[in-house]
Image (cartoon, rainbow, N blue to C red):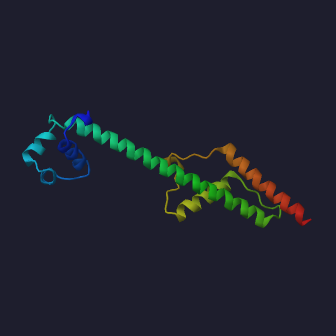
Amino acid sequence: MFKDLKLKERTAIELKYLGNTHQEISEKIDIPKATVDDWFTERGKLRQDYDFYIKDMNRKRQAEALKKYIESDENILTITTNIMRQIGTDLGDGKLELSVTDFKKAWEIQRTTLGKPTDIKSQNVSFNQEELDKEAEAVKDIIESEKEKDE
């Protein structure tokens, strides 16, 4: 659809998407404002292409934002896991019991520090209980091995 348009028409769609007014578009592409107005009316020549462009660009932006969000959360979870391991290694007295809740609290502290929301439900973030249990077990193993070294 979009590829069949002339350069000025494609440019008009892109400029409108970027928030330019019809007047600004007409000045930038050297077309009368009345023509630009007609292009974007409900049944205008560019209306369907513009609506398609909006959906396509918003879908791409949402996918990119989600990708960045997931990468950020994965990094936070990795850092949290490493911190929890270090805490376990440093304490090493056998009294430390780490649970999934402890990991979640550490995760929330990191997110708060970075200015990110901590409401898991509204963020579509979930903890894999099995993986977190394995991580907690690994920390406990480190604690036990450090304790044995000290004895």
Question: What residue is drawn where x is 20% and y is 43%?
Answer: 7
From the top left corner, tell me how far across and down residue 48 is, in percent: 22, 35
Rendering coords of residue 57 (x, y %)? 33, 43
Q: Residue furthest front?
A: 7
Q: State the residue at coordinates (58%, 61%).
A: 110
Task: Quadrant for residue 49, please give it.
Answer: top left
Which image quarter is the C terminus in?
Answer: bottom right
The image shows residue 112 at horizontal and vertical percentages of 53, 62
Residue 62: percent from the left, percent from the top? 40, 45
Of 94 and 66, nearer the camera is 66
User: Looking at the image, is 106 positioned above or below residue 38?
Assistant: below
* Residue displayed at 63% across by 55% down: 78
Which quarter of the figure is the N terminus placed in?
top left
Q: Residue at x 19, y 37 (%)?
A: 47
Q: Looking at the image, how many numbered discs can be counted on the residues?
A: 0
Q: Is residue 27 visible?
A: yes
- On the rendered structure, is 112 left or right of 6? right
The answer to whether residue 105 shows anywhere in this view is: no
